[in-house]
Amino acid sequence: MLFVRLFMDDGGRWPLVSVVIPAHNAEETIGATLESVLGQSYGNFEVIVVDDGSTDGTAGLVEEVALRDVRVRLVRQVRGGVAAARNAGIERTSGVYVAPIDADDVWHPQRLELHVAALEREGEDTGVVYSPYYRIDALGRERSRSYLYYEKGDVFELQLATNLVGNGSGMMMRAACLESVGCYDTSLHEAGAQGCEDYLLQLKLAHQFKFVCVPQYLIGYRSHRRNMSRNGVRMARSQVLMYRHVQERYGASGDYFDRGYGNTLSMLTLRVCRASGAVAGFRELKANLQSWRQFWYFMRSTVEVFVVKFQKLVMPGIFYWAEGWMRLRHERRALKQYEEDLAGRGEAGQRVARRESGDVSAGAQGSEIAGKD
């Protein structure tokens, strides 16, 4: 894993990136995912696809691509879950950086280039770079986009309160940092609560290393009927177990922890109520609640859910206009701050800022990502 290969590109030395793709019965989407990875503007990377016990044609499709492109390798294993599949791929990597992507997501062509540049600008104590994402449908059409969190440095407490990265395909990690925290945790899958392995790894990394953000929408996160995230109750239970794991391992506590845990209990309780009734939801809350402060955040989050639903029902036009205006204003501030941060690094940073603001505008990103299908 620590073996490093470098190559010459445009007169400079650029590190190898290892792209890891766990895949289970992904024959409908793996082709678009591989196309978006192999179409990256950054050329020095390898691709390890781990077929996690697929029963469809996933492995055959990957083998066809591997025959045409030597950068692609296929690893097969019996069904072990997404965390085990990612770890199996990571064990076979050779890169300085590791970039995971799910077998149904896609990347903007400059995703690797911009993330490598960000980590190369930072010190060794920065272990993760991340970007916001577009939500796309089964046909690759943009449906919405995530909130842009332009947070950097020591983000462990913020990451406890809210998931800054948002999905498993939107970050790149230093291989040495990933190895030091033990890669992905398989305990959630073993407990029957698979879903938040990405979030748990991000917290483990944030506890030891700094984060940096590239505030460009470089990821297409696909929503379809086979997504793990579509099972709302299981995802919420997975997140509760994740918080307990972090609490036991790192002694996490305080306002940020209680806020994140209380918000998660709200999500879990409402989803259980919807699926199994109010009594089952109350039992779920009672079994997991730890403190009055968590109950306060649970209540606040629950009320906010109903307030938003009411606003959408009564005045949808005003609600969506106001939400869009506030989001755009925030994104412009984040991009301005990003450009100022780069400009402060001198001439090289200014060149990157001009290139990113000119070549990777929001509209261009959306069309590039959606165009992968």
Image (cartoon, rainbow, N blue to C red):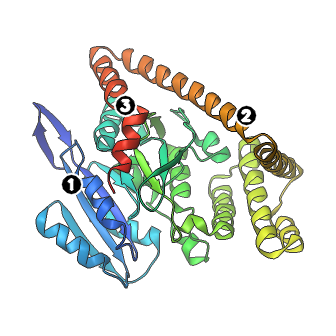
Q: Is residue 94 visible?
A: no
Q: In front here: 299 or 58?
A: 58
Residue 47 appears left or right of 9: right
Q: Which one is earlier in the sequence, the residue at label 2 or at label 3?
A: 3
Tell me the mark number nearer the camera, choosing from 2 and 3: 2
Residue at the (28%, 53%) spot, across then down: 37
- For residue 122, the mark is 3
Distance from the alpha carbon under mark 2 to that under mark 1: 55 Å
> Would you identify the image quadrant in which residue 291 lies?
bottom right
Disc 2 designates what residue? 318
Quarter holding the C terminus?
A: bottom left
Residue depicted at 44% across the width and 17% down the height: 340
Residue 118 lies, in percent from the top left, at 35, 33
Circle 2 packing at 10 Å, graded few (<14), some (14-19), many (20+), is few
Q: Position of residue 17 (x, y in %)?
A: 26, 49
Please state which of residues 288 and 221 is positioned toward the viewer in this rendering. 221
Q: Mark 3 Cα within 10 Å, few/some/many (few <14, many 20+)?
A: some
**Closer to viewer: mark 2 or mark 1:** 2
Query: Is label 3 in a helix, a strand or a loop?
Result: loop
Question: The disc labelled 1 sits on which kind of residue?
Answer: Phe
Let me know if residue 182 appears in the view. Answer: yes
Side (left or right) of 139 relative to 8: right
Mark pair 1, 3: CA separation: 21 Å
The quadrant holding residue 308 is: top right
The type of residue carrying mark 3 is: Glu
223 left or right, relative to 323: left
Secondary structure state at the residue bearing disc 2: helix
Residue 119 in picture, x, y percent from top left: 35, 36
**Residue on which disc 1 sits:** 3
The amino acid type, in three-letter code, at marker 2 is Ile
- CA distance for labels 2 and 3: 42 Å
